[in-house]
Amino acid sequence: MMRFATTIFTAISAAVILAGCGASGDNQGTEYAPNMYHSVAYEPYTQIVDKEAGSWLTSIEYPDEHAEFFNTNQFNPNHMNMRLPAPNTVSRNKNGWLPYRLGKDSLAYAARTLKNPLDSTAAMIASGKLLYDMYCDHCHGAKGTGDGKVASGVTIEDPEKGKIEKGAYNGVANLTGDALKNISEGHIFHVITHGKGLMWPHGSQISVEDRWKISMYVKTLQK
């Protein structure tokens, strides 16, 4: 009888444990020590002022006695975690460069006056090539001749319709052509930043330093 009861208890316990392992939809199942693998994002614009928030998640007693989700900075205005810049200051990047201020209509001035602040080394050009392959190849092509897949179109295989031609994006610039082969790195940098013609601006996607690296690499293609 004792053996039978032990077997029944073991079976029920195993069933409960296995049921806790099931997860689907909004039910993530039963987790052991969830605070070890569910990191809590530190949101600069979100203030959780309740020190008990997330107490169910943690078994650690914090030195300042707050639970897992509490993220309020008690020393900044409005309990913000991100400090406002000091008055009358302008942000700079890691190289100490000021933000690029020339407007879109200043291409001629940028082409004439801007100089690449980076040294033209093999490592810098190689870095520019990686960035070019990432951001530019799909339109301008590997050699800058304007024959990337976006420009020339692609052919895809459809199980029902067979080969389908995807339309080309006509008018992509040939960077090695006579019309552009003598442009300056400042010209290239400005166009990457603000766009020109069919090309959309990439200033928000590519950092200032990386735009200069790409400009440097494009000049090697033009040679």
Image: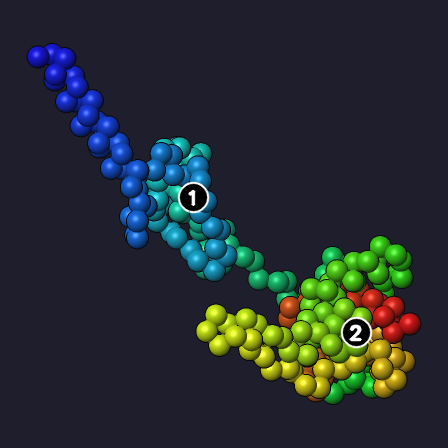
Residue in the picture at 74% in, 57% down: 94
Camera sees residue 192 = no
Is 220 situated above or below 40?
Answer: below
Tag on residue 38? 1
Is 74 situated above or below 89?
Answer: above
Residue in the picture at 71% in, 86% down: 171
Question: In which quarter of the view is residue 148 placed?
Answer: bottom right
**Which of 104 and 80 lies nearest the eye of the viewer?**
104
Tag on residue 58? none
- Quadrant the N terminus occupies: top left
Q: Is residue 5 left or right of residue 21?
A: left
Residue in the picture at 54% in, 57% down: 82
Residue 195 at x, y percent in the picture: 70, 80
For disc 2, the marked residue is 144
Is 175 situated above or below 19?
Answer: below
Residue type at mark 1?
Answer: His
Residue in the picture at 79% in, 80% down: 174
